[in-house]
């Protein structure tokens, strides 16, 4: 399809607006000219509090929107691009939860705007008398860096302190050199006035973007007046989900009211839906420009934007212009004839939130027996997990909607490990069986195919770029069994042997389709490249602090955000990390305090969790460790009390009869939860990650992008890819592609734009180019019902015109 240059220009402009957060009219008029210093009232000639910018200074309608125009509300945030991928978070998503709790924990349904909403009970600008409101809902925050008054605009033309000597405000509503700016201490009410001696507007400011002005003051403010840190330029990597998480911010207006809005992303806000937040929500109006909006992190305000636009509020995203702001500080200082060497402080969002671990829960239902019941987990598109028997006949189903387990009459045995393949099937690997079991994810149908003349003794596998599943054996002479998902053919390879003991228990494919296999008993790593060639990586021997028949590593997990494979130990004392860029590797020590108390058989198989960390799966231990794939920070926690479930002992609480049968086995991510395989316990375990798996993370530079993990997509295997309508590409046709396993109940769908579906049935489209994507809200909607989205979506707006 050919797009006209006019239509293509529309998309480029939309992209610019998304990146910068500018999409509606400003909420204050733009002065036609900056008054000369001589025109600025002297401090002695302080205007009355009612003073406002003269209407005569308002530019003509052709230049800017009319000041009398009703400010437009901020529209819903445009939909970013989507891709169903392994999670790309680099810090625990508890940061989103933490920031939300920082505000929500201060709120009470009994509060009111009248009693609890204003920063000051009284303000007398003429006599310099200010009394703070002790009943303010956020009275514990340090708000001394907010200027309540200046000699140019009175209580308007707001400014916010960002260094001890510099103020930031809105360029379209600025004051001039010579203006007196006032700050008030928190407790004593002592007033500090400073005079602007240097000023610079952002040199590229045009059409209210970037709408920033920096002012240099005649001297530093004392330490009793707080300069605020700003949202860091790399903030997006810290948040699992911004738009969907509904993280509240605190914003201010010309009446010094502490208002609450939800952060949409960048410098854009939206109206909250939470009832307590709504108590302190009001639209931004003319005269509110320049007032700040903050996230609250660890009890400290972090500057996000200063108001330019009305309604919910929006402004220039400060994080996008930090280097520019520092340059503006230098320029303003030069104009003032001083050298302060100040720069803004980027908030350190690295979380010290070690208390945020997933919540442990036993599922409903029990399956008793003194044996390891299953070492497999396969998820179908309806949200049911199918687990097959290890050495006894089992077919255990886990309903992830009802959170219960049950045992089916007909069972199967001999399987360890799964491969979530690109052909729509999940494969159960033959450890003690000559058959492959196949779960058709679309229908939930399970079949067995006799494929091998003997018992392969495999424990793991991964699908390569050629559609072949490679399954290493757990035997002295290593064999690699293969299954071609395209033809159904099987084969066997005798690769270069990694050591005297060839045993391998782990395989993971990187984004290119290269497969890495860590050693269980040997000291070398195998790699199968995209052509199917097998080699041994060069480097130091793999030790892991153990030898002989002590199993070093079980399982392997690829983390795309860092392009590395992580292998967690069974009895080993280190974590093996393979860099897929250059095939280098290293072993990172587990903490000494953890090793001092951990069981020797500490982990069954590691997994990438909803918070972006790699976790161990409980094996012969109730302790769990995790590693941050970006920083290699390792933490651990003991879940003994949770396993006891209020009983006197772990055995009584969990139903386990012998530690050797294991507490759990494999793990699978489903939505915001991780489900663990039923081993020797009678109860199955779920770990709840506080509903933070759905990842709609907008990358502000250079194009908006996001990750979403479907409520029913097993991590870390991708099940779909969607290319944004908003991303410029060499082709002039924005497109959407959905591939792999398509959503239920319709095999495929298109969202806003032209489509190409690898699954070949019906597709639906969106009527709006700026549609709000509601994640997996349509999963359970009736098929082809044009009204179902409005009834099933949890988000406030869903533009789907048919079910996905």
Image: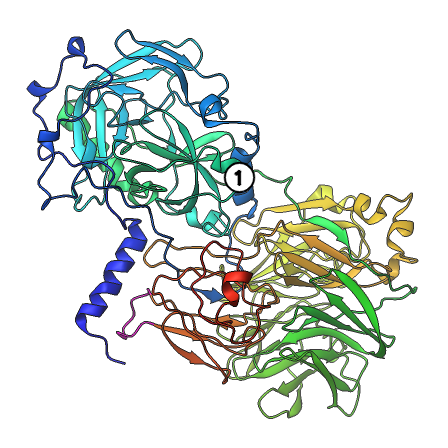
Please give the range of residues in magenta: 726-734
Most frequent secondary structure within the magenta stretch: loop
Residue at (63, 91) in percent of width and height: 488
In the visual, does 516 lie left or right of 50?
right
In the visual, does 786 lie left or right of 37?
right
Pointer 1 local density, CA inside 10 Å: few below 14, some 14–19, many at least 20: few
Total number of numbered discs in the rendering? 1
- Estimate the x, y position of residue 404 in percent, counting from the top left: 77, 62
- Estimate the x, y position of residue 31 in percent, counting from the top left: 13, 34
The answer to which quarter of the image holds residue 745 is bottom right
Residue identified by numbered label 1: 275
Can residue 460 be seen in the rendering of this structure? no
- Estimate the x, y position of residue 310 in percent, counting from the top left: 30, 41
Residue at (64, 66) in percent of width and height: 556
- Estimate the x, y position of residue 290 in percent, counting from the top left: 27, 32
Residue at (65, 61) in percent of width and height: 607
Q: Is residue 92 above or below residue 99?
A: below
């Amino acid at each position: 399809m050919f797009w006209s240059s006019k239509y293509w220009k529309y998309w480029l402009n939309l992209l610019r607006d998304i990146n910068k957060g500018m999409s509606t009219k400003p909420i204050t008029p733009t002065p036609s000219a900056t008054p000369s210093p001589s025109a600025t009232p002297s401090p002695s000639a302080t205007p009355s509090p009612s003073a406002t910018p003269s209407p005569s200074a308002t530019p003509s309608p052709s230049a800017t929107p009319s000041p009398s125009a009703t400010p437009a509300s901020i529209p819903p945030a445009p939909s970013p691009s989507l891709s169903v991928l392994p999670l790309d978070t680099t810090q625990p998503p508890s940061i989103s939860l933490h920031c939300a709790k920082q505000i929500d924990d201060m709120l009470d349904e009994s509060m009111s705007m009248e009693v609890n909403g204003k920063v000051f009970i009284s303000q007398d600008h003429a006599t310099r008398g200010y009394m703070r409101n002790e009943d303010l809902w956020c009275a514990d925050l340090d708000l001394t860096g907010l200027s309540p008054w200046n000699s140019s605009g009175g209580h308007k033309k707001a400014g916010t302190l960002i260094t001890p000597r510099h103020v930031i405000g809105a360029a379209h509503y600025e004051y001039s050199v010579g203006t007196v700016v006032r700050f008030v201490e928190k407790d004593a009410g002592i007033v500090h006035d400073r005079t602007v001696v240097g000023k610079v507007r952002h040199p590229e400011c045009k059409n209210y973007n970037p709408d920033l002005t920096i002012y240099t003051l005649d001297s530093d403010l004392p330490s009793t007046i707080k300069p605020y840190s700003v949202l860091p330029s790399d903030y997006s990597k810290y948040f699992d989900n911004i738009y969907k998480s509904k993280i509240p911010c605190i914003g201010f207006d010309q009446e010094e009211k502490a208002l609450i809005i939800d952060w949409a992303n960048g410098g854009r806000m939206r109206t909250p839906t939470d009832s307590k937040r709504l108590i302190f929500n009001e639209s931004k109006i003319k005269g509110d420009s320049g007032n700040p909006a903050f996230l609250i992190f660890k009890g400290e305000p972090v500057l996000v934007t200063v108001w330019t636009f009305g309604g919910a509020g929006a402004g220039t995203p400060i994080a996008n212009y930090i280097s520019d702001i520092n340059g503006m500080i230098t320029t303003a200082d030069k104009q003032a004839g001083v050298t302060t060497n100040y720069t803004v402080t980027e908030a350190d969002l690295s979380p010290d939130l070690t208390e945020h671990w997933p919540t442990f829960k036993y599922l409903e239902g029990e399956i008793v027996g003194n044996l390891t019941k299953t070492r497999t987990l396969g998820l179908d598109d309806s949200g049911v997990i199918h687990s097959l028997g290890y050495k006894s006949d089992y077919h255990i189903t886990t309903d992830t909607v009802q959170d219960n387990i049950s045992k089916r009459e007909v069972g199967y045995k001999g399987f360890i490990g799964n491969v979530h393949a690109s052909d729509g099937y999940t494969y159960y690997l033959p450890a003690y069986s000559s058959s492959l079991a196949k779960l058709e994810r679309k229908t939930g149908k399970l079949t067995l195919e006799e494929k091998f003349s003997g018992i392969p003794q495999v424990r793991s596998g991964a699908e390569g770029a050629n559609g072949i599943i490679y399954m290493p054996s757990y035997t002295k002479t290593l064999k690699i069994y293969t299954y071609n998902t395209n033809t159904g053919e099987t084969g066997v390879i005798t690769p270069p042997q990694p050591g005297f003991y060839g045993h391998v228990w782990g395989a993971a494919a990187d984004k290119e389709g290269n497969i890495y296999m860590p050693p269980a008993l040997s000291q070398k790593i195998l790699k199968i490249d995209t052509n199917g060639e097998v080699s041994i990586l060069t480097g130091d021997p793999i030790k892991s602090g153990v030898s002989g028949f002590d199993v070093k590593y079980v399982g392997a997990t690829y983390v795309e955000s860092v392009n590395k494979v992580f292998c967690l130990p069974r009895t080993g004392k280190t974590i093996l990390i393979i860099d897929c860029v250059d095939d280098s590797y290293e072993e990172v020590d587990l903490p000494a305090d953890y090793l001092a108390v951990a069981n020797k058989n500490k982990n069954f198989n590691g997994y990438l969790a909803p918070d972006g960390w790699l976790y161990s799966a409980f094996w012969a231990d109730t302790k769990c460790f995790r590693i941050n794939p970006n920083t290699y920070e390792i933490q651990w926690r003991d879940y003994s009390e949770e396993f006891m479930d209020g009983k006197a002992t772990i055995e009584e609480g969990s139903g386990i009869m012998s530690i050797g049968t294991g507490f759990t086995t494999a793990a699978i991510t489903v939505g915001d939860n991780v489900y663990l395989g039923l081993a020797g316990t009678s109860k199955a375990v779920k770990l709840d990650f506080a509903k933070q798996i759905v990842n709609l993370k907008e990358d502000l530079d250079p194009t908006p992008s996001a990750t979403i993990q479907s409520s029913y997509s097993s991590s870390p295997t991708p099940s779909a890819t969607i290319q944004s309508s908003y991303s410029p590409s060499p082709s002039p046709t924005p497109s959407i592609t959905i591939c792999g396993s398509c959503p239920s109940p319709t095999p495929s769908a298109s969202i806003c734009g032209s489509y190409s579906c690898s699954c070949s049935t019906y597709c639906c489209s969106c009527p709006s180019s700026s549609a709000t994507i509601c994640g997996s809200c349509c999963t359970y909607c009736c098929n082809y019902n044009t009204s179902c989205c409005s009834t099933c979506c949890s988000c406030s707006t869903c533009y789907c015109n048919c079910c996905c």
